[in-house]
Image (cartoon, rainbow, N blue to C red):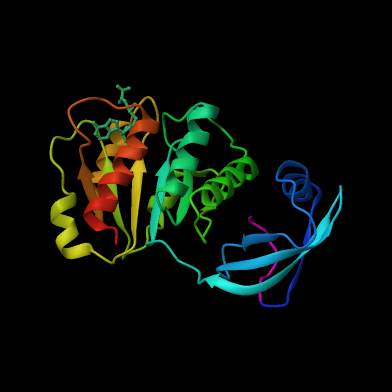
Amino acid sequence: LYVEHPLGAGQTVPLDRDQAHYLFGVMRLSAGAPVALFNGKDGEFRAKVAEAGKRGGTLVCQEQTRPLQLPPDLWLMFAPIKKARTDFIVEKAAEMGAARILPVQTEFTNSERIRQDRLQAHAVEAAEQCGGTYVPEVADLQKLSRLLDQWPQERQLMFCDEAEVGNALQLAAETQKGAPWAILIGPEGGFSEAERKRLHALPQSHVVSLGPRILRADTAAVAAMTLWQQALGD
Ligand code: SAM
């Protein structure tokens, strides 16, 4: 179970209504039952139900069962698409070990805003389901051009472009393993010529083809993360 509270041996952790409903209503746990807890910062702890109520309750932390396991420093940047597909991208990025998820507005992005809180909740659920101890932060929507203006010097960029034929990733893997990275996936309409020019000119950019077919953005995000993990993950 994910909680926002600090964790440590002996620590009492209050539960909100939804958490109490899940543990005591859905999972049918009662006082004394064990629960595995994580908060994305302190690792995983074994805890016990101290009080079980309809609208809340408390857990008491016992010992740490796993330390915090940080993923590689990988950002997934993508242009939001339809709601369900955007949810899918966030969920898969969290499962596949992205450290940060950054929705970006490109020239051909249709969405003007996103529900950051909802997307963050999807990232939490994905971390819970895959037994992670870390939850990637989902940033608010920001302009791609702004991000590129302040691009960190050391961060490498896997720029996924269907107009490309080669795969620069294997080569980059030889020199850039261990460096911070970002993957960039475009919107349904792809990137504009001006954006392509700018992305090609960025010294940290490695242009990557995901094969001869044009993939939907949600498929492309999963394919790109798989390739990256294989070439550069640990
Ligand atoms: N320009 C396109 C069009 O409208 O025909 C399609 C863009 S595609 C649906 C969405 C994004 O997925 C692209 O911007 C790119 O980042 C990524 N993508 C899809 N297929 C790809 C491929 N074969 N190689 C690399 N990237 C791909």
Percent position of residue 224, x then y: 30, 42
* Residue drawn at 52 percent across, 51 percent down: 127
Percent position of residue 190, x then y: 33, 29
* Residue drawn at 55 percent across, 28 percent down: 83
Q: Which of the two residues, 146 or 10, is positioned nearer the viewer here?
A: 10
Q: Which of the two residues, 32 or 38, is positioned nearer the viewer here?
A: 32
Is residue 13 visible in this depiction of the protein?
yes
The quarter of the picture where the N terminus appears is bottom right
* Residue drawn at 28 percent across, 67 percent down: 178
In the rendered image of this protein, does residue 193 appear above or below residue 116? Answer: above
Task: Give the residue at the far bottom of this rendering.
Answer: 9
Q: Which of the two residues, 228 or 12, is positioned nearer the viewer here?
A: 12
Percent position of residue 194, x then y: 30, 36
Would residue 159 be found to the left or right of residue 22 on screen?
Answer: left
Number of marks in picture? 0
Is residue 198 visible in this depiction of the protein?
no
Residue 36 position by quadrant: bottom right
Would residue 113 be found to the left or right of residue 34 on screen?
Answer: left
Which stretch appears magenta? Answer: 1-8
The quarter of the picture where the C terminus appears is bottom left
Q: Is residue 100 magenta?
A: no
Please name the predominant secondary structure of the magenta segment in the image: loop
Residue 173 position by quadrant: bottom left
In the rendered image of this protein, does residue 74 appear above or below residue 211? Answer: below
Q: Quadrant of ligand 1?
A: top left
Percent position of residue 70, x then y: 44, 65
Would residue 194 be found to the left or right of residue 99 on screen?
Answer: left
